[in-house]
Amino acid sequence: MRCQCPSAPLRALSSTLSGAEGCAAAERIMNLLNIQFPQVDAARLAQAHRDGAEASAPLPTEEQALLTAEITALLREKNAVLIAHYYTPEAVQELAEQTGGCVADSLEMARFGRDHAAQTLAVAGVRFMGETAKILSPDKQVLMPSLQAECSLDLNCPAELFREARQQHPERAAVVYANTSAAVKAEADWVVTSSNALKIVAHLKQEGRKIFWASDRFLGSYIQRETGADMLLWPGSCIVHEQFKADGLRRLKERHPEAEVLVHPESPPDVISLADYVGSTSNLLNAAKRSTAPAFIVATEPGIFYKMRQAMPDKLFLSAPQAGEGAACESCARCPWMAMNGLRNLRAALKDGAANEIHVAESVRVRAAASIKRMMDFSFAATAATCTAA
Ligand code: SF4
């Protein structure tokens, strides 16, 4: 039966809450924030799936070789470097590595771009990644293969709504995930990534601060459980990670008792509870490298398998089940927006830079840069302290 409670629009953000439990949890968040939250528009999502499938479809060998050569020449000619996220299609990751760019998570992408001598950054990822690169490198040109490549966490958290809700809780430290727009980052006190969120929230808790958290509620609730911090959670979610299913994961574990389970904390709590290791994409990659296990079940976007298999060719990597299993799987866990990064539109972006350039208003950029810098300074100090203690 269709849910008729006042929080129905919010419940539609996620299929992971069900029945009375889902209504109660959603209502609690709605009542606390007293705001109606947006859903990712179904038509827009369907279009993203179509565009992503088209952009990332395998190319004939000859065309791929031609595009690779052309893009390599364009990068050189434009004094540009290719920076790709772990979730982009394999051909793009491969090209970034071959041309002296990098394949990394969002923060490392921005840091690499800032420190690189190139004057143009070709960022293959989703829009907030291009924006973060521009925030840290205002004097460089930032291009993206598609300006339509978005992220549900960003779409779930429009800046006007965030500002309105945040004003209702001025006593709380506003901590926002990197997967938000530049405009939301500009309203925040801190930006965090899945690599450093735990440490930063634990630090704020130690200082006696309560947290206003946006935008991924599963990552937020994981941090809340781990740190015991008082956190008010924005109810956004990642359309990829929220689909991992605990029942299917349990069954896959039974079939592969030798495998360790690696889970990204944007996944639902019952999936996280089955993990041998929980961490950001980079941390999952490093955990697999450190482990002696011969196989891994991985609950994150399968684009990471390119780097995992490259580093550990003898090990087995299996995708954690989503809605259904094997042939019955309703989803391949691919992010439609990450899939929009293909070789054809990358070449077009480099050829006609202006059409695919990222711009961030200077007033927004300066305030967003302050929240990002706070995170970077904290992470740098924490790393330095660890090195000194070692
Ligand atoms: S995988 Fe999820 S968090 Fe990452 S870009 Fe796609 S929608 Fe956003």
Image (tube, grey):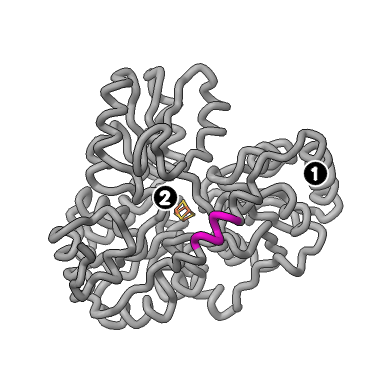
**Within-10-Å neighbours for mark 1: few <14, some 14–19, many 20+:** some
Span of residues in magenta: 45-50
Q: Amino acid at mark 1?
A: Leu
Relative to 315, does residue 214 appear above or below in the rendering? below
Q: Amino acid at mark 2?
A: Val
Quarter of the picture holding the C terminus:
top left
| Residue 23 horizontal side relative to residue 317, left or right | left
Residue 263 makes an appearance in the image = no
**Within-10-Å neighbours for mark 2: few <14, some 14–19, many 20+:** many
Q: Which dot marks residue 67? A: 1
Residue located at (33% from left, 56% from top): 200
Number of numbered markers? 2
Of residue 245 and residue 106, the one placed in the foreground of this image is 245
Q: Give the quadrant of residue 184.
A: bottom left
- Mark with earlier residue (2, 1): 1
Q: Is mark 2 within 8 Å of ligand 1?
A: yes
Point out residue 268 in the picture as x, y percentages from the top left corner: 28, 48
| Residue most extreme to the front | 1
Point out residue 150 in the picture as x, y percentages from the top left corner: 53, 62
Of residue 241 and residue 287, the one placed in the foreground of this image is 241
Q: Which dot marks residue 346? A: none
Point out residue 288 in the picture as x, y percentages from the top left corner: 42, 28
Point out residue 381 in the picture as x, y percentages from the top left corner: 42, 51
Of residue 212 and residue 305, the one placed in the foreground of this image is 305
Of residue 124 and residue 152, the one placed in the foreground of this image is 152
Q: Are marks 2 and 1 in contact (CB under 8 Å)?
A: no
